[in-house]
Structure formats: C-alpha cells, structure tokens
Amino acid sequence: MTAAKRTISPQVYARLSGVLYLINIACGLFGEVTRGKLIIPGDPAATAHHILASESLFRLTIAGDLVMHITDVPMAILFYVLLKPVSKDLSALAALFGMLQTAILCANKLNLITVLFLLTGNGLQSFTPSQLQSFASLSLELHESGFGVGLIFFGVSCLITAYLLYRSEYFPKALGILQAMAGVSYLINSFTLILNPTLATRMFPAIVIPAFIGELATCLWLITKGINVTKWNHRIAAGPLIQGPADA
C-alpha cells in the first residue's frame, strides 16, 4: 500500500516568497540606511572615525546584507515555480539573472570586509593612518559601484518577472507594471552610476522611490493575497502560455 502524495498548494509558495521578499527588503534597507549614516562623502577620516566608533553596527550591516542574499536564492526558485506555467524558459531566465545578481553582490561584500581589515587589521604599519583611511574610503566606493553592477542583472530579472506577472492571468496585471517600474529604475540608476556618477547621485531619490514602491507592493500582495489558485490550475491544465524549447 503506497502513501498518498501530498501536493503543496501554489498559495503556500506565493506566501512564502512574499515573506522572504519582506525579509530581503528589510535587510537591504537596514544595510543601506545604516551604512549611509556612517559614511561621510569626501571625508575619509570622519568616515573611518564613525565606522570604528560603531564597528559592531557596521559588521551587523554586512551580516544583514548576507541574510538578504541568502533569501535571494529560495526567492528565485519560488518565483520560477510560480511563473513557469506562463513560460518555463523565461521564468528560468529571470531566475538566472537573479542568481547572477546574488553572486556579484555576495562577492562585493568583500569590499566592506576589506574596510574593516584596513581600519583595524595588523601588519599595515608601513602605511600612515591617513593612507589607510583613504584606502578604506576607496573600498567603500568600490562596494557602491559593485552594488550598481549587481543591480543591472537584478533589473533585467525584474523586467522578465514583470512580463510574466502581467501575462500570467493568476496575478493582477498591476503587479507586472509595478515590478517593471522597479526594473527600469534599477537599470537607469546603475547605468547612470557608470556613465555619469554625479548625475546618478542627484537622480537617486527619484529613482529609488519607484523601485521601492514596486518591490514592496509585490511583496505585500504575495503575503496578503497570494495567487489565484483557480486560474493557476487552469493555466497548468492548458499548458504554458508562451511556448519555448523547454516546453517541447
């Protein structure tokens, strides 16, 4: 006598992805806002003083970022599961771009760890405190640039996800529009950071707000409303909306 198979409802996946998304957003905001208060642009000495005075807090922002990246992985898988009834190929592509972003941003955390080595490590006596502070400031700038590079891949992932959400029929089309808004915002910000850093600094408030709204709205919808299971089942029965090689 065989045991009956238990099928997990897509609603569980939707709610779980929403909870992970919320943790992701919270950790990301904590890291960016907290580090922003410690960093004084153009003043390596003051920045070093703030970081050393709040070293545990600075380390906590790194840990929080890593928690954010840990949630990236199951989120990518869950979104793949939720959106593959629309297109297996595109949902896999969105997950791949999301994973690339995570890999880049995880490696980028080494720039923040380098800051701590420069300001607190031994064996650097051949450098003056001023030089070490400048090197630490450079590492912080490299982290900012690396973050921008990572978000290019995330922006592409957001746009693909947005298209799938819009076409899905079991998610509101508004979610697709909001997710697209986030993706476009990240791409504009990241490429502007590379092409014209001064302009990117001035544009940042106008860019980050629509991105935040788009992601938070998607997150809250997944937690509170989830997915239309009836339409999901209809889509599963009908086959992928967008046929590709993976669906052959």
Image: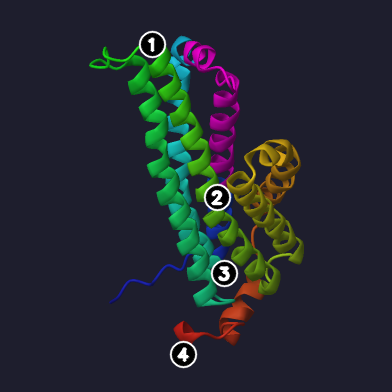
The magenta-colored residue range is 21-50
Within 10 Å of disc 2 (Cα), the crowding (few <14, some 14-19, many 20+) is many
For the residues carrying marks 3 and 2, which lies nearer the camera in this image? 2
Q: Which residue is mark 3?
A: 83
Q: What amino acid is labelled 3 in the image? A: Leu
Query: Disc 3 and disc 2: Cα gap in Å?
Result: 21 Å
Residue matched to label 2: 151
* Element under disc 2: helix
The residue under label 4 is 248
Say which of 6 and 38 sits in front: 38
- In this view, the mark in front (2 or 1): 1
Q: CA distance from mark 4 to mark 1?
A: 63 Å
Which tag, 4 or 2, sits closer to the chain's start?
A: 2
Residue 77 in view (yes/no):
yes
Magenta segment includes 224: no
Numbered label attached to residue 129: 1
Q: Disc 2 versus disc 1: distance between alpha carbons?
A: 33 Å
